[in-house]
Amino acid sequence: MIASVLLAAALAGQPPAAHEPAPAPATVEQASPAAAPVEGQHEAPAHDAGAPHAAAPAEHGGEAAGHEAEGHGGPSEILMHHVTDEKYGTFVLGPLDLGPTKHLVFFLVAAAVVLVIVRLAIRSYREGIPTGIGAAVETLVVYVRDEIAERNIGHGDGAKYTPLLLSFFFFILFAALIGLLPFSATSTGNISVTMGLAVVAFLAMQLAGISKYGVVHHFTNMIPAGLPAWLLPIIIPVELLGMFSKPFALMIRLFANMLAGHMVITTLLLLIPLMSAIGLVFGVPMIPISLLLALFIMTLEVLVAFIQAYVFTLLTSIFIGMSAHPAH
Amino acid sequence: MPTDPKALAYFAAGIGAGLTIMGGAAGIGRLAAAAMEGIARQPNAADAIRGAMILSAALIEGVTFFALIVTILLAIK
């Protein structure tokens, strides 16, 4: 259905000539001041040559500008509009604007879905043998507890961090799965959301060490025992860098994975209007090809949702284990 | 030949993305080949090997994404 809308937009609203006047002002505006004088010499003849051309599709130019205002401009704008955040309203609280945005709404939806599903699972658990949702959730919970928390933290500390790891797992899983539904968005495809998750993971790593060894001993644990003193100026910056790059890598990995899948799906669907801009002969056969490729990537995204939830949880548990049991 | 700086940025982004993917694919490919071989030789250890493989693949992928984000920034800024 999205594909047919895109095709209609390509056929009705955007004749190929309309593409050309639209980017031209953008490049002139965005050229940096330093480059402008150099550019000017080359630009002048180019403008003369372009002037008669630009006069003819002036109407189209206006039309294209109107389209861009709605966010349905060129392919790259459709692509960015699909993955970037969007404001739904404003709610100013002091210096902050806490208005709802697309990603915030779907963030809350994902959190609510997790809460509802877990509550349903607990209810089915109370009636004896779990059925349906209860059994499905139990499988994942037991897997996270036994295969992730106990195996990588272990030594009596696994149970303490299982609730945190389960929260990560189910939130990332449901945020990614909800993002695959039509008219929705993946809240973990926003770097602020993944930064929040990574900050919580970072605090958990530090707390795991500090609560066990105390503040001073926790940080001296990072230095290998029996290290020559002249290596300290090298090893301390390296360990500090490692301490902060772990959650940073968690943040980038989840963000990029969630963003990349949606960008690929949108790009594959955008092939239809791009090909039909060349000619209907190319555009119409592109419809089934694009739809099949997009369907393939979408099914792959279901797999990626599980893998990323697993990877984020697994890496967090390994890092927590590293600071709780620094000996290995 | 007049060149737009933006065109060079797009050019660099395309080449950079290609090189990034080549590196990432080579790394994950070697990893998967070794894991397959390991599982074929020692089917009992399939679970442990699979877990370690996913972990290493995630680490390689993380580095690849760092580079990809640089190229995306080149293309959209």
Image (tube, rainbow, N blue to C red):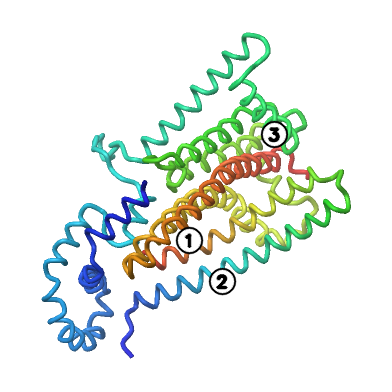
Q: Are marks 1 and 2 on the same chain?
A: yes
Tell me if mark 2 has few (under 14), some (14-19) or many (20+) residues whose alpha carbon lies within 10 angstroms of its own: some
- Identify the amino acid type marked 3: Ala
Q: Chain of mark 1?
A: B
- Identify the amino acid type marked 2: Leu
Residue at 44% x, 48% y is A191
* Helix, strand or loop at mark 3: helix
- Cα distance, mark 3 to mark 1? 31 Å
- The residue under label 1 is B69
- Identify the amino acid type marked 1: Ile
- Which is nearer the eye, A147 or A95? A147
- Which is nearer the eye, A87 or B25? B25
Residue at 83% x, 51% y is B39
Q: Are marks 3 and 2 on the same chain?
A: no
- Which is nearer the eye, B51 or A2? A2
- Which is nearer the eye, A275 or A21? A275
Quarter holding the C terminus of chain A is top right
On screen, residue A262 versus residue A237, left or right, reads left
Tell me if label 3 and label 1 are in contact, CB under 8 Å: no
Residue A149 marker: 3
- Cα distance, mark 3 to mark 2? 36 Å
Q: Chain of mark 2?
A: B
